[in-house]
Image (cartoon, helix red, strand yellow):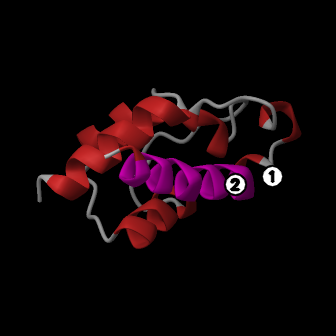
Amino acid sequence: MFDDYQAVYDTLLVIHQKHSRIYPENRKSKQMCCMWSTKNPPDIIEGTLPLEDIEDAFDLSIDGDTAMELYDMDLDEAARKILYMITNN
């Protein structure tokens, strides 16, 4: 189970780094919300590039409520949530 978690975490970290580097104020944070602008956060997470990258990487379809939950998590929490979603689909 740890190996599965680590694989999800590592993939999510790469996605996080890709998107958070766009926003210099967010680079050091491990909060999922930092993949989007924190100065001008999106009203809707669905359909945004970071979420689409997550869906593609894990072959998931994430609804609006779950997207908002992930947005409010740190990387560890989000990796655990995504692993749960993968194993319970």
Extent of the magenta region: 3-19
Residue 19, numbered circle: 2
**From mark 1 to mark 2, how far is it between C-alphas?**
6 Å
Residue sitting at 62 percent across and 49 percent down? 13
* Residue 65 visible from this viewpoint: yes
Near mark 1 (Cα within 10 A), the count class, few <14, some 14-19 or many ≥20, is: some
Q: Residue furthest right?
A: 24
The residue nearer to you, when weighing 42 against 34, is: 34
Left or right? Give the position of 30 relative to 79: right
Residue 71 % position (x, y): 46, 35
Decide if residue 36 is in sight here: no
| Residue that numbered label 1 is attached to | 22
Q: Is residue 57 magenta?
A: no
Say if the magenta span includes residue 9. yes
Q: Is residue 48 left or right of residue 25?
A: left
Q: Position of residue 42 (x, y in %)?
A: 54, 42
Tell me the element at label 2: helix
Q: Residue at x 42, y 38 (%)?
A: 78
How many numbered discs? 2
Tell me, yes or no, whether the two marked residues, 1 and 2, touch with CB atoms within 8 Å.
yes
Look at 61% across and 58% down and name the residue there: 15
Q: Main secondary structure of the magenta part?
A: helix
